[in-house]
Image (tube, helix red, strand yellow):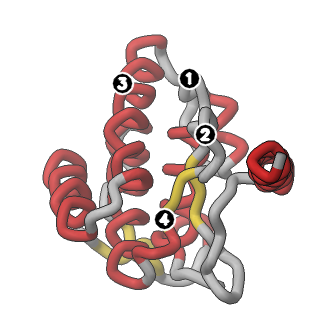
Amino acid sequence: MHFNHYGGTGAELAVRMVNAPVVSDDLLRAHELRVGGLSQAQCRTLTEWAGRLRPVFTEPELDTVVKLVNELLADSASKPYISQHDGRPPHLHYASEHDDAVARVLAFTAAGLANLVCEAPQRLGHCGRSGCDVVYVGTSRNGRRRFCSTRCANRTRVSEHRGRRRAEG
């Protein structure tokens, strides 16, 4: 499934931030964001923000997800505007490219999740394997993803199979 820029890449960055132990320059650069060197305080701020993003993926009630994303938007977003930086075609920004990296990342991830919640909230998820905390955005055609990886799916299925065999005697 293809999402718009914010619903796709903004939500994808949110996933990477939530799944990372610490948000760093390298993580943001890998996502093609120009950050220019984050301070330790900025990394802490973004890591704390990632903690606020996690419940959006794990909350089962859509009304609560909407409330959480609205809180993220309120705490991050400025007025939307159209940008044409770096020779790119016109596209929507929620923070000025002149804002600091933290403000841009907060707005980008909040807007990405907001777009995804409006387009396909069922695609937000977290791994169904007990003990795995990985979150994801399901992009498969049928949108039925339950696990973060084939490895977690296989472990769960093997465990279920062994449990059935034990129950059979």
Q: Nearer the viewer, residue 85 or 30?
A: 30
Say which label, 2 or 4, has the lower sequence index. Answer: 4
Of circles 3 and 1, which is in front?
1
- Quarter holding the N terminus is bottom right
Q: Residue at x 60, y 52 (%)?
A: 128
Q: Which mark is residue 135?
A: none
Q: Secondary structure at mark 2?
A: loop
Q: Are marks 3 and 1 in contact (CB under 8 Å)?
A: no
- Which residue occupies the foreground of this view, 4 or 66? 66
Disc 4 is placed on an element classified as strand
Read off the residue under disc 4: 124
**Residue type beneath disc 4:** Leu
Disc 2 target residue? 130
For residue 22, the mark is 1
Residue 60 rendering spot, x and y as whole percentages: 34, 61
| Residue 21 in which image quadrant | top right
Q: Is the residue under label 4 in contact with that under label 3 (CB below 8 Å)? A: no
Three-letter residue code for mark 1: Val
